[in-house]
Image: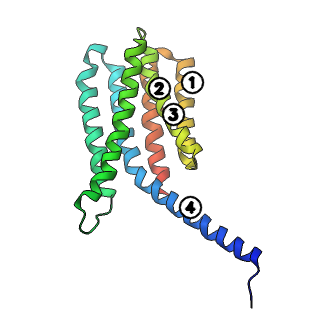
Amino acid sequence: MAISERNAAQALRSVSDVQRRTLLAKGYGQASPHLALSGVIWAAGYVATGLTPPETWPYFWLPLAFIGVLGSFALAFRAARPVAGDPAARIMPAARMLWMVGASMAFVASTFLLFQPKDLVPALAFPALFLAYVYVLVGAMGASRYLWIGGGIFAVTALGLILMPHAIAFWVAAAGGGGLLAGALWMRKP
């Protein structure tokens, strides 16, 4: 029995759709530990920010950033598959992670240098809004869970800016930290 051209095309589309969803689920699974690590660091850093005076912030943010960078590298290295005869193959995904984290940190820092905010509220809210923006962009490229995570981070941060700007550090801890942790749990599910 011969298969029609239409049925063959439909079968190929189905196979392609299954392949796309499988790769997306794998990507979500690999991203989950990164989101969990970032969520814990984000929440801890912003809660500490809300509880301490600004002059003490570098004492916990610098170590947290260092832990985050090293942790992201280690997670990416661990997730990469070893390739026989190419020991550097596992380094490349981890190096890409470092570039992505470094570029994001450099962008936020250079924005602060450019605009030199005097008010702490926008300075505390900006990293969360930037993170939300990046996640929405990734989500718009087809990884829809990132779209929802980014949208949630944006909504909670914006709500905090409107309702309680004096407590923005805690809103950003909930938006970024809570959003990333919730996203990590969601990403673990296929």
Contact, CB < 8 Å: mark 3 with mark 1? no
Q: In which quarter of the image is residue 114?
A: top left
* Labels 1 and 2: the sequence-earlier one: 1
Residue 3 at x, y percent in the picture: 74, 83
Residue 171, numbered circle: 2
Please provide percent x and percent y for residue 36: 38, 45
Kind of element beneath mark 2: helix
Mark 3 nearby-residue class (10 Å; few <14, some 14–19, many ≥20):
many
**Is disc 1 surrounded by few (<14), some (14 to 19) or many (20+) residues within 10 Å?**
some
Badge 3 vs badge 4, beta-carbon distance below 8 Å: no
Which circle, 3 or 2, is nearer the viewer?
3
Say whether disc 1 or disc 4 marks the residue closer to the N-terminus: 4
Q: What residue type is labelled 2?
A: Trp
Circle 1/circle 2 CB separation < 8 Å:
yes
Residue at mark 2 to residue at mark 4: CA–CA distance: 34 Å
- Of mark 3 and mark 1, the one earlier in the sequence is 3
Assess disc 4: are there few (<14), some (14-19) or many (≥20) residues with their C-alpha within 10 Å of its C-alpha: some
The Cα atoms of the two marked residues, 3 and 2, are separated by 14 Å
Q: What element carries label 4?
A: helix
Which mark's residue is nearer the viewer, 1 or 4?
4
Q: Which of marks 3 and 2 is nearer the N terminus?
A: 3
Q: Is mark 3 on a helix, strand or loop?
A: helix
Mark 4 residue type: Arg
Where, by quadrant of the figure, is residue 136 drawn? top right
Q: Residue 159 carries which label?
A: 1
Task: Please report whichever mark, 3 or 4, sits nearer to the chain's N-terminal start.
Answer: 4
Q: Which amino acid does label 1 sit on?
A: Leu
Res 62 → quadrant: top left
